[in-house]
Amino acid sequence: MKAELEALQVEALEAIQTTGDLNTLEEHRVNFLGRKGRVTDILRGVSQLSVEERPLMGQAANAVKVVICEALDARKAELTVVAEAAQAESEAVDLSLPGRTPRKGHMHVINQVTDEILQIFGDLGFQTATGPDIETEYYNFDCLNTPKEHPARDSHDTFFVKPGTVLRTHTSPVQMRVMEKFQPPVAVVIPGRVYRVDYDATHSPMFYQFEGLLVDKGITFADLRGTLMHFIHRMFGKDIEVRFRPHFFPFTEPSAEVDILWKAKDRHTGEMKSQWLEILGCGMVHPEVFKHAGYDYEQYNGFAFGMGVDRIAMVKHGINSIHHLYENDVRFLEQF
Ligand code: PHE
């Protein structure tokens, strides 16, 4: 039994010393010292021995047990240090790595330009009004002196929601909604989305307009021109080239369109090109429109204008296609 004990101790110490991880070490503990372990077995066998042998062998077995126990504890301490170091290594944070900043959004260029326009007219004392995108034919056309068979309706290429209801083709219907609510003097600007069946480099089926309406006593075309020139100079600087062209709108008389010289890179050749771009329509409010509003057209007159916000943005920033504005390509939008 003595030899057996010695061999067991040698075997156990060898096994413990060569163990590389804590799980295997625990297996050794169970195997040697556990309830059914090999040392435990021997200790149990001691009671079968003769009275003389019992204390001797009992002490010897206990001594082996203590040696193995100590070896297990010592190895466990070593392996724990190694395991903790490995964990620290794998979970380490490298403070020298460059950080990842979350991307920040910002206002869309259309909204930036709309805000700029609002600011300019706000400084002149204009108030802001809005109206619905889905309009009745009455507000979009009829009350603006554009009855059913009027050829001017064709130029708008209207999206019909259902008979009598349209996606508004311009912001002008809001003129009437404002006049129905307020008596003159009235000075409002009206930003909003409008819709037309139209698609090319300078047209999009949905685009943004900006309407203006001023009604008071003794307003003249000179007031209209002066107001618009003030706006254009603040928006684009005093050097911008501007031209007023006579035009026709059913709801204004006389009417004009305003073009400005637009400089942008040609999409194909990359060369700088300049070309006249129509940015707005305007005129003196037609007496028929005042009649629908219930305004006394003998006493009051006024001017109105409607501009394409997209066009303003294109001229201001040298953008060569309206579609850049609506494709939501972040590489484009980030430039503004
Ligand atoms: N509503 C016109 C358009 O969209 C623009 C306009 C507005 C013209 C007000 C005159 C007066 O083309």
Image (spheres, rainbow, N blue to C red):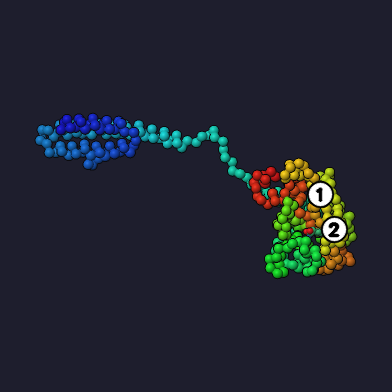
Q: Is residue 33 left or right of residue 175?
A: left
Q: CA distance from mark 2 to mark 1?
A: 16 Å
- First in residue order: circle 2 vs circle 1: 2
Question: Residue 202 location in percent, x, y?
Answer: 74, 52
Q: Name the quadrant of the N terminus.
A: top left
Quarter of the rendered image showing ligand 1: bottom right
Q: Residues within 10 Å of mark 1 (few under 14, many from 20)?
A: some
Residue 58 in sight from this viewpoint: yes
- Image quadrant in which you'd find residue 50: top left
Q: Amino acid at mark 2?
A: His
Coordinates of residue 108 in the picture (x, y in percent): 68, 49
Q: Is residue 188 visible?
A: no
Q: Which residue is mark 1?
A: 276
Question: Please, what secondary structure does the residue beneath circle 2 have?
Answer: strand
Tell me the residue at 39%/35% (across/down): 83
Q: Residue at x 21, y 37 (%)?
A: 38
Q: Quadrant of residue 79?
A: top left
Locate residue 313, reporting x and y percent: 74, 49
Q: Is residue 333 left or right of residue 148?
A: left
The quadrant of the image that shows the C terminus is top right
Q: Residue furthest front?
A: 269
Q: Which mark is residue 247?
A: 2
